[in-house]
Image: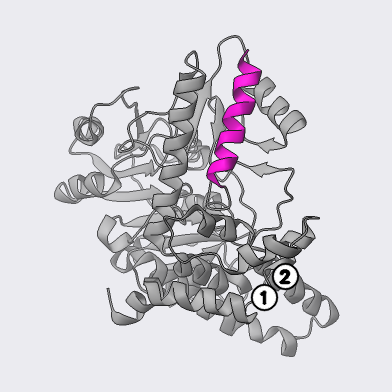
Amino acid sequence: MDKQMADLTGDSKRRKFLKQLLSGSIATLAMPALAAGASLEGKDKNALLTAPADVADERYWEMVKKQFTVPSNLIMFNAANLCPSPYFINDLVESTMKGLGKDVSFQYRSQFAAKRAKSLEKTAQFMGVTKEEIGIVRNASEGNSIMVQGFDLKPGEEIILWDQNHPSNSIAWEQKAKRSGFIVKKIPMPASPKSADELVAAFAKAITPKTRMISFSHISNTSGMTLPAKEICKLAKSKNILTMVDGAQSLGMMDLNLTDVGCDFYTASTHKWLMGPLENGILYVKKEHLEKLWPNVISAGWKEMGSTVDEKLCVLGQRNETSPFALPETIDFHLTMGKKNIEDRVRKLNARLKEQIQAKIPQAVFVSPLSSEMTAGITIINLPGKTPLEINQKLYDTYGIACAPSGGVRMSPHIYNTMADVDKVVEALTTLSA
């Protein structure tokens, strides 16, 4: 890691953030709380302004929570689907959109090219790769589709998929196989794996001399199981097999460096754990593999000799140019807190959630593995005699808790949640389980 990145992710950056907050150079902390209808009069305001920089202190995360406009009567517990953005990201997107509404001239819009370039550079640095290897698409599904439609597999060749892959990384391959003649092999994982080696072994067993690619979700959105991506990619590389990782549930939640992971392709969205603007996705293609992909969409400005992922694969016609505008600030927000600190916090929230459910709702059936090694930010349960849809609706209607009925009752807390929020969710589930 170079010095510049170390400075961004270190304690000095967090101290700078607090200093900026206190001086008002980012924005006044009162804004999001007031927007939610709360009051920061008296001691509440003083407590907020003196929140510590120690991420082990719950008051730090209470301060972070106040960077979001979620009202106090709601608990967002569905990061696996859609996250709120910090209020200053919303403000930036809104003000940029308003500016475009007033002036759609080429002259006004010329600023977007420079901002997109900065977004590519920042995102690439955040992910541990070069800016030439990153492209901005509209979401992870589009990134997956670019891969599926752009990568040639010949009749008889094989691609190995995890049977818990997202449809855009599963059904999409099956549909293409129908017209191209390659073979799709879907492999299951043990429901209660004892080690990461057991998960890697499932892929190793499926490999044949015809295997050309292994494509898998880093984290399952339907079970919460986390695959050992680095070890699977290492296995594939040893067999001269390419790897594609769907990182929709890992980018922004895990302390991730794609060079370290060793994958050849990676896709993700910015509206999930990254907490960034809507209608943005990330496509990573290792530079030596760029020529292996055909573009899906060719529009004005596309050049056959394009030498970067963004130039070759992401020229998609007229788009909402204001949305990528906020990516650099989104990345800065993460780096301010530290990627590892964010992952540790999400894991601690889920650990408390599991512990409390086990203690207070012993009849709950866990879909997600209980081992911290096998899961990350998603906890899914079922309650006997209750449907996930029924529980999900009652959680929102009665308690203002937003989860998802995906694979069970899916809960995915993030840094805008506190330990008190976790306890409220368990309290609600306890009542509903009776």
Residue 21 as seen in the image, left or right of residue 94: left
Nearer the observer, 62 or 300 = 62
Check disc 1 and give the amino acid type: Ala
Q: SS of the residue at dot 2?
A: helix
Q: Give the residues in magenta.
A: 418-434
Instruction: Report how many numbered discs are placed on residues in the image.
Output: 2
Magenta stretch holds residue 422: yes
Q: Residue furthest left?
A: 238
Pointers 1 and 2 in contact (C-beta within 8 Å):
yes
Q: Residue 100 in the image: x percent, y percent?
A: 78, 78
> Please, which colouring scheme is shown?
one colour
Q: SS of the residue at dot 1?
A: loop
- Which image quadrant is residue 116 in? bottom right
Check disc 2 and give the amino acid type: Asp
* Any part of residue 426 in sight: yes
Q: Is residue 179 above or below residue 242?
A: above
* Any part of residue 165 in sight: no
Residue on which the image places disc 1: 27
Q: Is residue 249 above or below residue 325?
A: above
Specify which label sits upstream in the sequence, 1 or 2.
1
- Which image quadrant is residue 84 in? bottom right
Q: Residue furthest bottom?
A: 107
Residue on which the image places disc 2: 91
Nearer the observer, 80 or 12 = 12
The quarter in which the C terminus is drawn is top right
The residue carrying pointer 1 sits among few (fewer than 14), some (14 to 19) or many (20 or more) residues within 10 Å by Cα, namely some
Magenta stretch holds residue 23: no
